[in-house]
Image: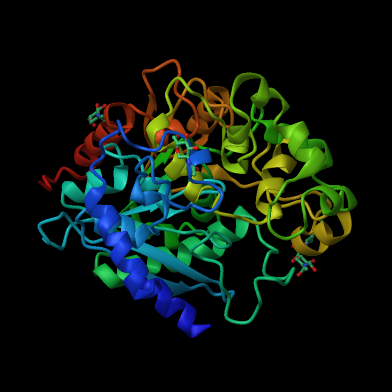
Amino acid sequence: MISKFVLFLLPCFMMARGETEAFEKDLLLYSADTERECEFFEDIMPHKKRNGSCELNPDVYLNVPQIIARHGYPSEAHIVQTKDGYLLTLHRIPGPKSGKRGGQPVFLQHGLLGSSADWVVNEGQALAFFLADQGYDVWLGNARGNTYSKAHVTYSIKSPAYWNFSWHEMGTYDLPAVLQYVSTHTNRPGEIIYIGHSMGTTMFFVFSSLKPQAAKNVKLMIALAPTAYMTHVRSPIRYLAPFSNDAQWILRNLGFNQFLPRGKILDLLNYECQLLEQRKICENAFFLICGFNKAEMNMDILPVAFAHDPAGSSTKTVLHYGQEIHANGNFQQYDYGKEINMIKYNQSTPLKYDVGKIRSNIYLMYAEKDKLTSPIDVLRLSHKLPNLIGLYRVPNENFDHVDFIFGKDAMELVNKQVLKVIHNFTETDMV
Ligand SMILES: *[C@@H]1O[C@H](CO)[C@@H](O)[C@H](O)[C@H]1NC(C)=O
Ligand SMILES: *[C@@H]1O[C@H](CO)[C@@H](O)[C@H](O)[C@H]1NC(C)=O
Ligand SMILES: *[C@@H]1O[C@H](CO)[C@@H](O)[C@H](O)[C@H]1NC(C)=O
Ligand SMILES: *[C@@H]1O[C@H](CO)[C@@H](O)[C@H](O)[C@H]1NC(C)=O
């Protein structure tokens, strides 16, 4: 197991020598000259092989530390162990290209079926690089069960026990561990700026409502596409809702461990998508669940986005949202069925998360066309948060759930606003 982590830490040694040379040549050749860039993922998927007649964006076959290094930034990887034995990988850009260090720590947490890659692949618009350029010490989380955090001190990743988690455990085990690690490692307790997207916000609402003391490590939380209440969801995830408590159905159609929808269930989920988009996009679980919208998506990065997402999660993680939709959109803990609920919660139904207990300063950013997070639910949340410091609707009618990270206008509409909010709140000039 140890050797696997060494490989993560030393990505450059992952390739045999001959391959490394070919690979370096590719990096030199690649000039972001979109004229010759491979247009579509059919050119590179499923084997991510090079195609002689077009160049492909090297980020397609690089891992996150390599992508960061390729763009000229300092790049680090750290392994953090949670109290329940999960081993999580944090990626870090400790500062700008100049090598200057010691900036304020910012922690970016990806969304459902995503990974740390989501913050670095949107060429020219990536939030992680933008914040590093401004002098921040940027840390990228990876939730348990994704590409980079698929390890445990005792459970094999093939065992059902390993996959027995949802975003509840990400909020109650992963975030306390990684935020404590960042605050200790940087020696900046109480100074972390947390930015979450999608499930990255759900995890934070779980964390800060149940562990307000630990949440004091966070000075400010910025929520991109805040996901808590789910009364007006238009994502196909809603089709799973009626079945979300039916163990037999789940086992047959989704797999109990890792979320890997196939066959008939995939056809059901992507029916609406197929009417509008290309087949390949609709078969990608990440875009299928989170939404896809040609109007705002940066189509140039589609091959890269496909190479990195879906990054994997447990079936339970997706079902937990399905259960919420089924339970009138309530923001509540996992429903284990009456008997186990009695043991776990001392009541037959799951406990609700009390967002009124959250003490953190929170800024919400939402989008009108978001299929997973409806503006109605965001407004409801905003009324309940005791320390809401602002509410921002992205001023673009076409903005959808994934456009916060993959949008072609993410720099103007999201990143610059994020920076303004941080500056405004911390009243420090980092540049
Ligand atoms: C390479 O890409 C071109 C242009 O997209 C495509 O027409 C061709 O079929 C691809 N070749 C291979 C071997 O995949
Ligand atoms: C998963 O967790 C629940 C609740 O803690 C428990 O009842 C169940 O036995 C666990 N299942 C596995 C496969 O570990
Ligand atoms: C469980 O709930 C019952 C009835 O609501 C209450 O009387 C009891 O104190 C609770 N037990 C615990 C351990 O919280
Ligand atoms: C900045 O702070 C002021 C005063 O607290 C507030 O009125 C304004 O809306 C804030 N701007 C942003 C972008 O958060």
- The spot of residue 403 in percent (x, y) is 43, 31
* 288 relative position to 41: left or right: right
Residue drawn at (14%, 63%) of the image? 101
- The spot of residue 354 in percent (x, y) is 59, 45
Along the line of sight, the residue nearer the viewer: 4 or 320 = 4
Query: In the rendered image, which quarter is residue 74 located in?
Result: bottom left
Residue 327 seen from this side: no
* 110 relative position to 236: left or right: left
Q: Is 16 situated above or below 273?
A: below
List the single residue furthest toward the bottom: 2
Which quarter of the rendered image does ligand 3 occupy? bottom right
* 16 relative position to 266: left or right: left
- The spot of residue 18 in percent (x, y) is 34, 71
Along the line of sight, the residue nearer the viewer: 224 or 213 = 224
* 252 relative position to 209: left or right: right
List the single residue furthest toward the front: 52
- The spot of residue 166 in percent (x, y) is 64, 56
